[in-house]
Image: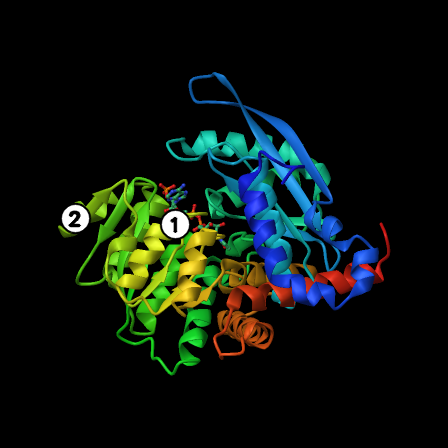
Amino acid sequence: KQRFPNEPEYIQAVSQVLETIEDEYNRHPDFDQANLIERLCIPDRIIKFRVNWVDDKGNVQTNMGFRVQHNNSIGPYKGGLRFHASVNDSILKFLAFEQTFKNALTTLPMGGAKGGSDFSPRGKSNAEVMRFCQAFMRELWNYIGPDCDVPAGDIGVGGREVGYMFGQYKKLTNQFVGILTGKSQEFGGSLIRPEATGYGNVYFLKNMLKTRNIDIKGKTVLVSGSGNVAQYTIEKLLELGAKPLTCSDSDGYIYDPDGIDEEKLAYIMELKNIERGRIREYAEKYNVKYVAGGRPWSEKADIATPCATQNEINGEAAAELVKNGVIAVTEGANMPSTPEAIKIFQDAKVLYCPGKASNAGGVAVSGLEMSQNSGRLKWSREEVDERLHQIMDDIHANCVKYGTEADGYINYVKGANVAGFIKVAKAMMAQGII
Ligand code: NDP
């Protein structure tokens, strides 16, 4: 805290992990001698650069670009790029730190990283987004590579942005290699990658409910966000017979008492991915409630799954969810619940899982995309989905193994942190002080 006083999200993420791994850490005196905690918490390196690009009016704009390479003990650096006005060192350091544990949980050989820019694609033309992505990659290309660091998408970075960055990397290096995941199908993308985070989130939720013999069918669900993760979370919820009631964007949320069905979801995908419109338009089209500036946590439902951004459920919202009888909370987003909210869920014995476990499906399929690219192969939809399902089941089993408490309550936070920590720590110890 003294060393990084201006980085609250990073301190929040690190504190949460350290609190839960203490017992495990104390069992290994050799970790202490190797100063493992500092070496694990502070990123290997942070690359920071200025990005110049020209807008449609001919004005030269500047943004900041970042890549935080956190830890590559178990595999090449891997983690998404976020393009959003709020991006700064603290947010990317928290995300890269979390990614290191998440990637370890997937069972695949991937280290942790995160990057991005304070550039926001919102309101920009296609041509402006392309020029920005090209300028961003002109700076980043030298620090990434298929065996070194393989970025992916995150908030504000979807298939379009990945495509433009991949094109620029290829132009600069004359190499067609898997340096980004989340690519389109035509040039090396994996089937199921766009769906993976949302689908994986629901596979995990199903496992959580199973521990209490609860069927997901017929359960009402509050979803936040309306981007990649929210859309495919809703799709899988519908497939399994659940009833999603809400979704949101940074301007507000909609509440649809009849449930968001397949047809309405198709409309959301068109609105958000093609027209790049606002969720308010859903409320206008289907004549349902819209709450400007609000988040959906005061609505009544069986399950909540935040899929927008960090710290979107605070203590007050968590208390309201618990009061309304929520039985499970599974995080599609990264760190959407504040420490106060997590404590409220856990004290109420709600099934609660942190994003580093429940949203690991996205990076898991990114890992599978890397394997397919290295082998110049393409697996079928069924094959990738089956592997994703298995990985989510394995992550759940690991959380149960390391997180079950004396009274039988599964502390998924502890389970995920300890399982991820042990793997990375052992790899670091074996590789010496480097
Ligand atoms: P998208 O950009 O596709 O969607 C993000 C959604 O969240 C949009 O609806 C956006 O609204 C909303 N949002 C963003 N910032 C805020 C904010 N400050 N307040 C309220 N709403 C906000 O991103 P993804 O769906 O890919 O990512 C969502 C979350 O999931 C992030 O936390 C990300 O780190 C995490 N995640 C994503 C993975 C992936 O594979 N994509 C993998 C693992 C985790 P608006 O349209 O107004 O911007």
Q: Position of residue 393 (x, y in %)?
A: 53, 75
Asked which quadrant contains residue 66, the reply is top right
Residue 166 in view: no
Q: Which residue lies at the image location 63% right of the left edge and 56% below the top edge?
A: 18
Determine which of the numbered discs, if any, sits on residue 314 in the image. Answer: 1
**Mark 1 neighbour class, 10 Å CA radius: few under 14, some 14 to 19, many 20 or more:** some
Sooner in the amino-acid sequence: mark 1 or mark 2:
2
Identify the element where label 2 is drawn.
Answer: helix
Amino acid on which the number 2 mark rests in the picture: Lys
Question: Which residue is more in the foreground, 263 or 221?
Answer: 221
Identify the element where label 1 is drawn.
Answer: loop
Q: Is residue 19 above or below residue 271?
A: below
Q: Is residue 370 left or right of residue 337?
A: right
Q: Is residue 96 above or below residue 429?
A: above
Which residue has dot 2 on it? Answer: 285
Spatial separation of the CA atoms under disc 1 and disc 2: 31 Å
Question: Which residue is more in the foreground, 176 or 135?
Answer: 135
Q: Position of residue 322 (x, y in %)?
A: 32, 63
Mark 1 against mark 2, which lies toward the viewer? Answer: 1
Residue 41 in view: yes
Residue ranking furthest to the left: 287
Q: Which residue lies at the image location 70% right of the left edge and 44% below the top edge?
A: 144
Asked which quadrant contains residue 198, the reply is bottom left
